[in-house]
Amino acid sequence: GYPMLLIAAAGLLVGIGTAMSGGCTSGHGVCGLGRVSVRSLAATLTFLLTGIVTVYLLRHVIGLIA
């Protein structure tokens, strides 16, 4: 498994991101985009790009995920 400190840090970052963006990923992605909200589009793109960059760094740069 993964180190508990890494899991705790990830959870903390998710909570901070949710507070900063004014909603969760599914709220912005489903409801916000359904309302054609520019703010939700920006938030959803930010969530997706951050996830893509994180996986790339963990897999290919740090080598943490097999």
Image: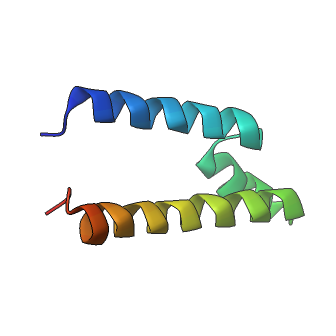
Q: Residue at x 73, y 38 (%)?
A: 20
In the rendered image, the quadrant that contains the N terminus is: top left
Task: Please give left or right for residue 19 compared with residue 62 in the image.
Answer: right
Query: Considering only vertical position in the picture, is 14 above or below 29?
Result: above
Quarter location, residue 42: bottom right
Residue found at the far front of this picture: 61
Report the label total.
Answer: 0
The residue drawn where x is 87% and y is 64% is 38
Rendered-image quadrant of the C terminus: bottom left
Q: Position of residue 18 (x, y in %)?
A: 65, 37
Residue 63 relative to residue 27: left or right: left
Residue occupying the point 57% across, 31% down: 15
Q: Which sits in the foreground, 31 or 14?
A: 14
Q: Position of residue 5 (x, y in %)?
A: 29, 28
In the image, residue 25 above or below residue 29: above
Q: How is the image coloured?
A: rainbow
Answer whether residue 42 is visible to the viewer in this image. Answer: yes
Residue at x-position 63% and y-position 40%: 17
In front here: 20 or 44?
A: 20
| Residue 62 percent across, percent down from the top left | 26, 61
Residue 54 locus on image (x, y percent): 42, 60
> In the displayed structure, does residue 38 sit left or right of residue 61?
right
Q: Is residue 37 visible?
A: no
Instruction: Place residue 9 in its image quadrant.
Output: top left
